[in-house]
Image: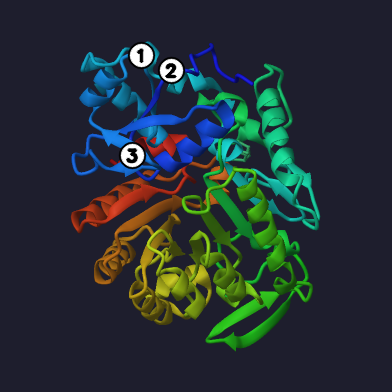
């Protein structure tokens, strides 16, 4: 089945440009979806040249194109680098634009990263994203038989893309979502998964958390709940009695195995993002971390209010990480935002987690609450002290959904903090919750 803009010569040798960590995923995808197999790899890195990848030689560009003059080339790097690499290839005059397959296999249409590359457990259904409301495109499943899910997921993708590109206004929440954009995507939504989300909202319509952040919109806050005081450290845990994760761990495992069997997911590369209220205090949560970390790279969103041996063990995989929304640099502001008096404890836990692996911090900027110099300087100091390599800056999702812009003072404060973090060598990334208007004023570069 051809899914391309025009036919290509499948019998011509296919040279994969890029022998890095993304290349394995591309080899799998192109061989399975388009019956294209690498003849050899090309890489600029001279230490790789002369070695092999997947049993195929890694060559310099010059040697490769001289050896295979009638070749197709596929750029097997991350998508952001394609334009630049194509430019380089064409200007060397060694390669003609029509030899490069990437844009033959891809088309321009309206879609989003989540539709193309993500899957999320969404209550008792499967969705592309979990954080944009309950009416996002999804299909129901009770997870007792996962074997049909990959095909259903691909069908849902294709149907959603078709609907979004029909030219007729739709009632999908995607229409008002800032993730939707016209761009170049793999034809018809047949791309592999680059992102799996497992969240507390999947288990029952509740989650468990040890903090009570003022910006949290979790459904369980509205649900009936029982408050247990001082159950874990100084925190309060709130949860519904129906919250039983243990019995459902096997569903997650079966589901991921099925995706892998159907070649939608590469366990060695695809991160599994764990978002759970607070996974480390969710009954069965540490067991879930333990099971998943044996096979997957985990990106765990946690508040670090408790120290979990299972999470620490998961971090020993260099591809895994934990992301902690600290949102403050002083104990006073931390208390104002998290409504738990555990700032010192969290900092102590972060120190401990850093001994095991990759810890990243996040700062959700809240106007008039944490956009002041003492909190921002305090946060920068903590990053320095912990040796944090990457920090994320985010806006308050509630404001973005309401379309509210940040005040200029807050934008200035954000730019101040970005500069301070960069001055100590921290990579600063944007957590995608800013309105596009605010993003134009924030200097992440
Ligand atoms: S466009 Fe927005 S709402 Fe639709 S799937 Fe993507 S992230 Fe979710």
The residue at which mark 1 appears reads as 70
Determine whether the residue tagged by mark 2 lies in a helix, strand or loop: loop
Looking at the rendered image, the disc whose residue lies closer to the viewer, 3 or 1, is 1
Of the two numbered discs 3 and 2 on the same chain, state the one appearing first in sequence. 2
Number of numbered callouts drawn: 3
Q: Quadrant of ligand 1?
A: top right
Can residue 26 be seen here? The reply is yes
The residue at which mark 2 appears reads as 12
Q: Nearer the viewer, residue 276 or 9?
A: 9
In this rendering, the answer to whether 425 lies above or below 165 is: below
Of the two numbered discs 3 and 1 on the same chain, state the one appearing first in sequence. 3
Can residue 137 be seen here? The reply is no
Q: CA distance from mark 2 to mark 1?
A: 7 Å
Of the two numbered discs 2 and 1 on the same chain, state the one appearing first in sequence. 2
Q: Quadrant of the N terminus?
A: top right
Q: Nearer the viewer, residue 411 or 30?
A: 30
Q: Residue 208's spot in the image, x, y percent? A: 65, 71
Q: How is the image coloured?
A: rainbow
Residue drawn at (67%, 76%) of the image: 238
Label 1 neighbourhood size at 10 Å, few (<14), some (14-19), many (20+)? few
The residue at which mark 3 appears reads as 19
Residue drawn at (61%, 87%) of the image: 231
Q: Residue 75's spot in the image, x, y percent? A: 38, 29
Q: Are marks 3 and 1 in contact (CB under 8 Å)?
A: no
Residue drawn at (67%, 60%) of the image: 252
Instruction: Say left or right for 79 vs 122.
Output: left
In this rendering, the answer to whether 123 lies above or below 405 is: below
Q: Are marks 3 and 2 in contact (CB under 8 Å)?
A: no
Q: Residue 359's spot in the image, x, y percent? A: 38, 65
Residue drawn at (69%, 80%) of the image: 227
């Amino acid at each position: 089945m051809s899914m391309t803009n025009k036919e290509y010569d499948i019998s011509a040798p296919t040279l994969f440009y890029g022998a890095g960590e993304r290349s394995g995923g591309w080899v799998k995808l192109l061989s399975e979806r388009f019956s294209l197999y690498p003849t050899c790899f090309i890489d600029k890195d001279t230490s790789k040249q002369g070695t092999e990848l997947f049993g195929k030689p890694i060559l310099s560009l010059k040697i490769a194109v001289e050896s295979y003059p009638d070749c197709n080339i596929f750029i097997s790097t991350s998508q952001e680098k394609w334009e630049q690499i194509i430019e380089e290839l064409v200007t060397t005059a060694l390669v003609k634009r029509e030899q490069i397959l990437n844009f033959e296999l891809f088309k321009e249409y309206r879609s989003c990263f989540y539709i193309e590359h993500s899957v999320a457990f969404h209550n008792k259904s499967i969705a592309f994203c979990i954080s944009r409301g309950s009416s996002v495109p999804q299909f129901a499943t009770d997870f007792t038989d996962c074997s049909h899910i990959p095909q259903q997921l691909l069908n849902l993708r294709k149907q959603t893309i078709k609907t979004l590109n029909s030219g007729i206004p739709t009632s999908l929440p995607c229409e008002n979502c800032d993730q939707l954009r016209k761009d170049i995507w793999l034809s018809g939504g047949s791309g592999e998964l680059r992102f799996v989300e497992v969240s507390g909202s999947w288990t029952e319509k509740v989650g468990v958390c040890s903090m009570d952040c003022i910006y949290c919109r979790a459904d369980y806050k509205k649900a009936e709940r029982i408050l247990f005081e001082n159950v874990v450290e100084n925190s309060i845990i709130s949860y519904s009695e129906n919250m039983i994760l243990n019995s459902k761990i096997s569903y997650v495992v079966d589901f991921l195995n099925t995706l892998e069997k159907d070649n939608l997911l590469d366990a060695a590369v695809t991160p599994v993002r764990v978002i759970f209220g607070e996974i480390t205090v969710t009954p069965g949560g540490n067991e879930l971390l333990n099971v998943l970390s044996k096979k997957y790279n985990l990106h765990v969103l946690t508040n670090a209010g408790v120290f979990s041996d299972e999470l620490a063990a998961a971090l020993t995989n260099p591809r895994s990480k934990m992301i902690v929304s600290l949102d403050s640099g002083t104990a006073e502001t931390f208390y104002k935002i998290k409504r738990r008096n555990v700032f010192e404890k969290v900092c102590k836990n972060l120190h401990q987690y850093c001994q095991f692996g990759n810890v990243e911090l996040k700062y959700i900027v809240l106007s008039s609450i944490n956009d002041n110099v003492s909190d921002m300087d305090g946060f920068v100091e903590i990053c320095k002290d912990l040796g944090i390599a990457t920090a994320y800056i985010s806006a308050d999702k509630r404001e973005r959904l309401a379309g509210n812009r940040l005040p200029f003072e807050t934008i200035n404060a954000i730019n101040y903090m970005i500069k301070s973090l960069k001055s100590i060598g921290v990579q600063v990334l944007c957590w995608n919750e800013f309105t596009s208007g605010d993003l134009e004023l924030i200097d992440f570069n």
